[in-house]
Amino acid sequence: MTAIPIGLGAGGRELWSSIADEYALDPAQKVQLLEACRAKDRLDRLDGLLRGDIDSWARLTHRLQTDDYELKIDAALTQANATANLMKQLLAALRLPDVATGKRPQYRGARGAQAPSVPGGKKAGTVTALEKFREASGG
């Protein structure tokens, strides 16, 4: 049994226990799990805000330069969606084995822009569709 990190809320502690007690995690996976547990706690607080259990949806702030007040509305729904996506990515990054088969998900590298393999973007001797069209049309 792995000790539950200090500072987690009820949801985060439950998520930690359900995964850390079931799987042998390496140090990197423990860090990812801790961040997922913190995201779970943030989601729980944002859910309370969205359901109206917490009264901090809007607040008045005084502008220091003037005598005006400004109404600030929290973007709780946007933040909840972003946090849910973060938690999903962190849990997927753990690559925990499937309960039924015991197999881990396939490792996939980070996605991003792909650099051309050859300067100019094509291999030597490769003809692009545009070049074929120009040749066929006589231009």
Image (cartoon, rainbow, N blue to C red):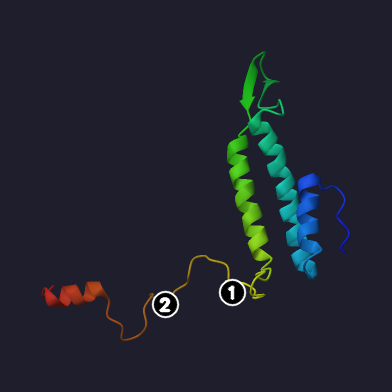
Near mark 2 (Cα within 10 A), the count class, few <14, some 14-19 or many ≥20, is few
* Spot occupied by residue 101 in the image (x, y as percentages of width and height): 64, 75
Q: Amino acid at mark 1?
A: Gln
Q: Which residue lies most toward the left here?
A: 138
Report the quarter where the C terminus lies.
Answer: bottom left
What residue is shown at x 22% (from left), y 75% (from top)?
Answer: 131
Residue visible at 13% across and 77% down? 136
* Residue 106's disc number: 1
Q: Tag 1's secondary structure?
A: loop
Give the labeled residue for mark 2.
119
Q: Give the distance between the C-alpha atoms of the residues marked 1 and 2, in whole angstroms.
A: 31 Å
- Residue depicted at 20% across the width and 77% down the height: 132
Location of residue 4 (image quadrant): bottom right
Tell me where residue 55 appears, x and y as whole percent.
71, 25
Under mark 2, the amino acid is Pro
Up the image or down, 90 lies above or below 77; here it is below
Q: 117 or 9, which lies in front?
A: 9
Left or right side of 99 for 24: right
Work out which residue is located at the far top of the displayed protein and give it: 67
| Marks 1 and 2, the one that precedes in the sequence | 1
